[in-house]
Image (cartoon, rainbow, N blue to C red):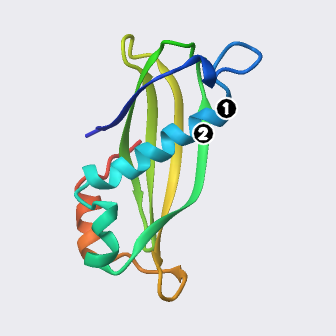
Amino acid sequence: MRLELLRAVIHPWHHDHFGHMNVRHYAPFFDDATYHMWTALGLAYRDMQEIHGVHTVTGQATTRFVKELQAGDLIVIDGVVARLGTKSCAFHLRMLHADTGDLHATCDVVEVVFDPKARRSAEMPQAMRAKLAAHLVET
């Protein structure tokens, strides 16, 4: 099941000299959506370290640009858990036009479980794995 993560509006200051949203502005939208993803999965980032002793860091983010956006366009970002590993998981996020449903961009994000005391990756706690597994979707 896809989870709705974020809604936003494209402003003129997002534009470049070509008149459409510049690539630099996609990253903050997808990054914010990733934070919301954790809460939507029942793993609020603000509680993750206290409850599970770990947090996550983004190890990789790959954006695919599909269709340009203009000032005034409304977007919605949704996402799914696309892969579950031993020390990481992957989210597949889509940026859609809120009015038309058109696909404008995708972002595939690898989130690495991180032990802040050891300052390195760590095995995913079972309680986290169970919540992620409940939302795992083939993409």
Q: Please state if 5 lies on the left or on the right of 59 as rendered.
A: left
Toward the viewer: 35 or 104? 35
In percent of width and height, residue 76 lies at: 38, 27
What numbered label is drawn on residue 23? 1
Q: Please state if 23 lies on the left or on the right of 79 as rendered.
A: right
**Which residue sits furthest front?**
13
In percent of width and height, residue 19 lies at: 69, 12
Spatial distance from mark 1 to mark 2, Cα to Cα?
A: 9 Å
Depth check, mark 1 against mark 2: the one in front is 1
How packed is label 2: few (under 14 Cα within 10 Å), some, or many (20 or more)? some
Q: Which residue is mark 2?
A: 63
| Quarter of the view holding residue 49 | bottom left
Are dots 1 and 2 in contact, CB under 8 Å? Answer: yes
Q: Amino acid at mark 1?
A: Val
**x 47%, y 87%: residue:** 117
Vertical side of 98 occupied by 25: above or below: below
